[in-house]
Amino acid sequence: MQYRTLGRTGIRVSLLGLGSGGMSRLGQRYEFSALESEGLVRHALDAGVNLIDTAPGYGRSEELLGQALLGVPREQYVLCTKFQPHAPGDRQFYAASDLRASLEASLRALRTEFVDVFYLHGIAPAAYAEVCERFLPELTAARDAGLIRQIGITERYQSDHAHVMLRRAIEDGVFSVVMVGFNLMSPAAVTSILPLAAEWGVGVVVMCAVRSVLVNPSEVEAYVRQWESEGLLEPGLVPPDAALDWLLDEHTPTVASAAYKFAAAHPAVGSVLTGTATLDHFEANRAAVLGEPLPVDKVQRVLSVFGPVQRNVQPARIPRLVD
């Protein structure tokens, strides 16, 4: 396993992190037993993974992790969970005291006395100021009480393609870790979040490195044709019916492997989350991250082709990731 320092936190994290959300949720989607979920977690730990991400909204993930991590020395893993300031689809914020209650419930489920990173979760740009005013005092008090080590924030990736909220959060200097959506077809964080985080010493955890659309050729084709018709993507840059096939070679057998390699390539990235249910799937993702990197010309082509495709901002010039 490779390890990187998570910004100014000084915490060393595995380049591949284990996520417990997404489609699988540690096998909950497939009705895995608790013992099967524990086997996956222990396998990841044995493979060198030390960053584990969860949230109260991920079904029974916190409870499953609490059971799976019993007996594992606490210093051997970096545990992250979250608080969403309002119910999904509801604009009414919870009370400030609800954050502490949620955190304490998470600690009980996880069977731990503290979490290493506690995120404000899924914050939209328009909600950012009020979220900070309402909940930052509670977060600071929880940190002072030793219940959390670092304060983080995650973006609302599906609607904030320009990463407006995270740019503001980084520059405010309050958050020491951010979680950003970053993948082959949405690589624009290279122009904003990654260099800004490096400048401010903020740790970066990547979510959504592999999304279902990326591994579904018909969906990729539909997006490419739509973006071409909307003027967001220059026609002819990639063939719509094979828009990502040029990434594949003997070291990169699948689009998913290319996606993990791409997400892990930037030095500002501390860890890339993988959500998985099977050991074979986990091992394929680990091999992608730790194996031969994407060639520089392919990385640059991803940035050149898909970087300007920002659905809610004007296209931007994409700088070179490496010289």
Image (cartoon, rainbow, N blue to C red):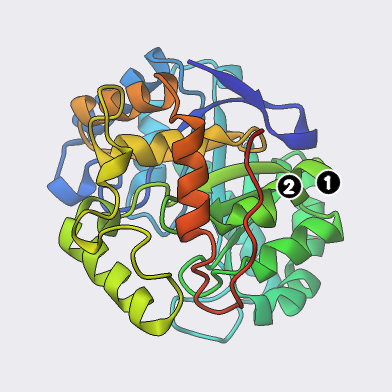
The quarter of the image holding the C terminus is top right
**Any part of residue 144 in sight:** no
Mark carried by residue 200: 1
**Any part of residue 142 in sight:** yes
Q: Which residue is mark 2?
A: 195
Position of 75 relative to 103 (above/below)? above
Q: In the rendering, at what x and y percent does residue 307 appear?
A: 53, 59
- Secondary structure at badge 1 equals helix
Residue drawn 42% across the image and 70% down it: 234
Residue drawn 64% across the image and 24% down it: 4
Label 2 sits on what residue type?
Answer: Pro
Q: Nearer the viewer, residue 134 or 303?
A: 303
Residue drawn 23% across the image and 71% down it: 222
Within-10-Å neighbours for mark 2: few <14, some 14–19, many 20+: some
Q: Nearer the viewer, residue 57 or 275?
A: 275
- Secondary structure at badge 2 equals helix
Q: In the rendering, at what x and y percent does residue 5 appear?
A: 69, 26
Residue drawn 45% across the image and 16% down it: 48
Label 1 sits on what residue type?
Answer: Trp
Quadrant in the rendering for residue 223: bottom left
Within-10-Å neighbours for mark 1: few <14, some 14–19, many 20+: some
Quadrant in the rendering for residue 278: top left
